[in-house]
Every structure is written in structure tokens, then in C-alpha cells.
Amino acid sequence: MKLKYTFALSNSNLKGNRHSISGVAVTALLCISLTVISLLSFTLSRQMNEYKNDFRARTIEAYPYNRVFDEKTLDEISKINHVESIDIEDELRVQFFHIENICDENGTYDELQNLINEKDTLISAWSLIGKEKRPVIAGKSLDEAPQFSCIIPHLFYPFDEDVYETSGLDYIDGESLIGKTLTLNEGSSGFNIDFFDGNEGRRITVPSFDVKLKIVGVYYASVTADGDPSLIYISEETGKELIKTASERAGESIGELTEFMNRPEFHNIHITVDDFDNLNEVYNELSQMNIFVLDGTELGINPTIPVITTIFKVLSVMITSSTLIISLILILQSSKNIINNKKDEIGMMKAVGYKNSEIFSCITAEHIIMTLRGFIIGTAVSAIAVTIINLINYNSTYANRIYIINWINYLIFTIIALVIVVFVPLICQILFLRKLTKIQPKDAMNNM
């Protein structure tokens, strides 16, 4: 039988099949759950995993308040299970700057400079520590760049606004700034150096000075992190040079600052744990050793994000599993009904010369037509839902960008849904193939 006749006959049979509407509805629901609920779960889980694998999400900062970090203490810490490394802080950790100017080899970069002149700018510069590597998605990493280079987030917003509270911000494409040079200044607040002198915490404020950093690359700023579009990274060597420059400008405070720099036991330390899930165990060990640590790691996270991620995971598993099971039951029942209720029709088809393979093709085509209708409806609804989700969150606060769905991932999940709704009916038909072959032409005569 020609393919077009097979589908014509199957389509005709579907019109009288009361199970076809429910089959289309369940297939559509399966597609929606796979391409929206499961995709949201995947999107959130992937970003959570990116966060957990980040160096700073596994790094605990400790202060020498209760115990100084002499060799004995450092040795005890290094023997704690899951401690991967200990880095003594002797470089710039974080400093807030204002942008004075941005330029390239051709002079001032007017497009951004005009915005800088109109708005108050504020960025935070963090230096890498120890074995930390910050991969880039464009340009060069800090490992490949000379001193006084920096990498910026892929979405750059160097203005003094709370991106977690403000919606509809016009982010700057970080890649467009590669090769430009930032001239930074601390402004009236000055260059602050915090340290512990053995008795209490101290701060020395050095008069502001210009810092020139060339933008060499762009990193992907995960929305799950406490980082934001105004956070830039510099190398550990650049951080040490900035501390050195600031120390030289310390004036009458140079003596106590030099003394502090030469006493590493009074420096903060950064303890890196091998796995994010082992952080609590290491925290408990440090507390028992009477070591003062910061609550939470250097890379914080909104506490609601893990909860929301878990909710979507549970919803995804429950809805997808239940819909898939219902789909299987309906398709199996439909297949069984077709064979039981159409015994005479199948027998008649055999009597007039239809082969088992041709009858099998007709029944299979019925299910393919039914599931494809459901697939088209489901994917259409899903595409509309994803479009609305993305539009809302693109124009919402920076934190809400966690819910933005990648269209490539949407396409992948749509293909998975298509494979499921096409091959499940085929498998069901194969299960009933033996029963189909047992129907004889005389069965049609017996029911007349």
C-alpha cells in the first residue's frame, strides 16, 4: 500500500476513535512538561552546578582574631579532611573604583564615555588567589595577559545602581570592550587597606590614585553567584602591585603597614575545599579549632535559589513521569482497543488481501498522526511560554535572569519530546504485533 493511502486510511479511522482526543491532549501535556518544566529545572540545575564548581564558592575566608596563623595552625588546617589548599592573603582582595576614563589606541571611547560622564560609576575589582583560574568566553584569560590587565563580565554594567533591585537596565556587551583601557580611581573614599595588627582590626586609607587596566577578556558571570555586572577580575600579581603602590603612598602609616606586610601570621587566609558539599564539615572542624571564619563562602548565593531549583526538579520529575506513564497507558489501551474492537475490520482487510505489515502500518500511522498533532500543539504552547518567560526576565532584575531559557536547549528538549512521542507508539504496536497476526479473515465473517 502506498504511503499516502496508508495515512489517508489512518486519518479516516481516527475520526471515529474516541480515544484520539485524549491521546492528543496527553501528548501535548507531555511535550509541555518536557520543554518547559523540565527545561526550567535543567536551566536552574546547570547554573547551580556552575556555582558549586566555582573556586570562590568552595573557598572559606578566615581571620586571625582568635588564633594567629602560624605554621602550627596552618599545618592543623591543612590536615582537615577535604581541605584542598590554603592561601595567605598578601594581595588586593577587593577594592571599589570609579571609572575616570575608557579609551583605546584611537583615544577616548566616546560611546561609553558619554554614559560615564552622565552617571556615577562604581565597580569592584577582585584579584585571583592561589590556584584560582577564571575562564573566559572571549578574548584572553589573565594567565595569558600581562600585568595590569583585567577581565570583565559578559554583561557589563559599571554604574552605581542595585542591579538586584532595578529592572530594565541596558547592559553593555562585554566583548565590545575587549582591547579598551579602563582608568580607575577610588574617588574621595581613598584606597582602603584592612589588616589585623594582633589586637584589633585596622584600616589605613591611602589617598586615591589612578589605576589603568586593559580589558583583555570576558568571563561568563553566572546569575547564581553573588557577583554582578560590575565585578572585574585582575591577576594575583596585579593585586600585589596595587598593594605595593598603595603602601608607598601610605605616608606616616607606612611603618605599621610595612610591619603588617612582613608578618604573614596576621594575614587573612583562604581555605579551599575540594567539593562544595563538604563545606559544612570543614566549617565545623574550623569552629572546633577556635578559628574565626566568615559566614558563607566568598561567592555567596541567594538562599531562595536552591529552594526554587529543588521545587522545579521535583515538579519536573513528577509531571514528566506521570504524563509519560499516562501516555503509555492510553497508547497501550488504544492499541488493544483497536485490535479488539476492530477485529472484524482487520479480518476483512486480510480477506481482501491486506498483509499484516500493511495493517500494522495503518495502525501505527494512526498513532503517529495522533501524537504528532499533540506534539505540534504542545510545542506551540511551549514556545509561547518560553518566549513570555524570557521576555519577562530579560527586562527584569539581574537576579531574575537565572530563569532565562536558552533556545538551543529548548530545541534539544523539543527533539527529545518528539523522539518519545513518536517511538513510544511504535514500541506499543510491536508489543501487539503477535496478536495482530492471529486475527484471521473468518473473524470478520463471525461478527456479521
Image: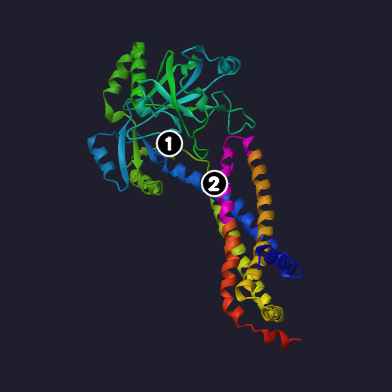
Q: Which residue is mark 1?
A: 298
Quarter of the image for the C terminus: give it: bottom right
Relative to 213, residue 155 above or below = below
From the top left corner, tell me how far across and down residue 129 is, in percent.
35, 31
The picture quadrant where one finds residue 238 is top left
User: Is residue 401 highlighted in magenta?
Assistant: yes
Please identify the quadrant where the N terminus is shown.
bottom right
Give the Cα separation between the discs numbered 1 and 2.
Answer: 23 Å
The label shown at residue 43 is 2
Q: Which residues are magenta?
A: 393-417
Q: What type of secondary structure mainly makes up the magenta span?
A: helix
Residue visible at 56% across and 74% down in the picture:
431
User: Which amino acid does the dot numbered 1 rest on?
Assistant: Glu
Q: Position of residue 417 (x, y in %)?
A: 59, 56
- Label 1 neighbour load within 10 Å: few <14, some 14-19, many 20+: some
x 69%, y 54%: residue: 377
Residue at horizontal 66 percent and vertical 79 percent from the top: 350
Where residue 402 appears, as percent x and y from the top left, is 56, 41
Is residue 95 left or right of 173 when viewed as pictured?
A: left
Q: Residue furthest bottom?
A: 446
